[in-house]
Amino acid sequence: MIEITFHKTEDAKNLFKYFQLYLASSALSKNNILHIEDQHIVRIHIQPDMKKHFEPIKEVFYKFITSKQDDWFRKIMAEQYYFEDEEEQQQILEIIHSILEGNRKDLVVFLNDLDMEANLKNAIQEIFRENISFSFDSFVKFRMRPLMDQMVKYVEISIDEYKMEQEYQMFIQMLRDFITGKDPKFKKIHLLIDDGIHFYDENFFEIKRGDLSRMIDRKLLINHPVYVDSVTIAPLLSIAPEIIYLYTDDKEQRLVRTIQNIFEERLTVSSISEFFHHKHVRSLTADEKI
């Protein structure tokens, strides 16, 4: 028999629900949750074939532990980093989950030496030996201490990223406000991002870099010298075109996403090949008129 003791009734009930969901009913005793004063014991009967039943039990216990991780992440945010607002916690949790799921390659590099899944499974492997009885709270406090330290690292990295994203959104909103109501110097701009960054007017005549520099509103560079890109963003903001046709073969690069976030519905993104096609068609049309 396996007996796992809890201080919290809710934890005992939740673990038992996991066992009911994932284990055959024959593994459960008639008196599955035993209440003794301030303790709650979850009992699981083991069939004679020990090896056959231990692996599913360990897997269920692993699922139960991972179901509690968000609560532990939130506790770390509140107690160690003073992030107590639920909405902020949720946004930070979303970043943590994106890292755990391998969707944030830019952040995973800071956590290459950490493997929460493997460490948790190793801790479970050590505690489940033969017919055993242990305290869940002691397991968390002692066996999972290295894992908790890793969770702190995940929270730290995710909070830093959250702060950067908040600053970025404030920056984007400031730039949106800057172009609101601003008279456009060109109604349409064609922007080619290839081996460099090239501006063209609506007739596909390239705008020289010197002309672009003269158009730049100097207040942008004086007030935000670090954040405003003088090669691309500053000229676009200063021109404030009604329509931007942007051509690139890498639509996910940060510069493209920044331009999308600033100009939103004013922007149309196409491939580089489409730029040369439209430029060629425009040239033929101009020749015909001549």
Image (tube, rainbow, N blue to C red):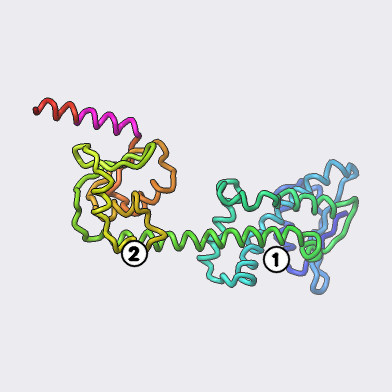
Could you tell me if residue 41 is visible in this image? no
Q: Residue furthest bottom?
A: 37
Residue nearer the viewer, 41 or 149: 149
Q: CA distance from mark 2 to mark 1?
A: 57 Å
Q: Earlier in the sequence, mark 2 or mark 1?
A: 1
Residue nearer the viewer, 22 or 232: 232
Task: Say which amino acid is labelled 2.
Answer: Ile
Image point 73% across, 52% down: which residue?
62
* Residue that label 2 marks: 222
> Splitting the image into 4 quarters, where does residue 215 fall?
bottom left
Task: Say which amino acid is labelled 1.
Answer: Glu
Q: Position of residue 129 (x, y in %)?
A: 88, 51
Q: Which residues are magenta?
A: 272-282
Q: Secondary structure at mark 1?
A: helix
Tell whether position 91 is magenta.
Answer: no
Q: Left of 230 or right of it: where is 138?
A: right
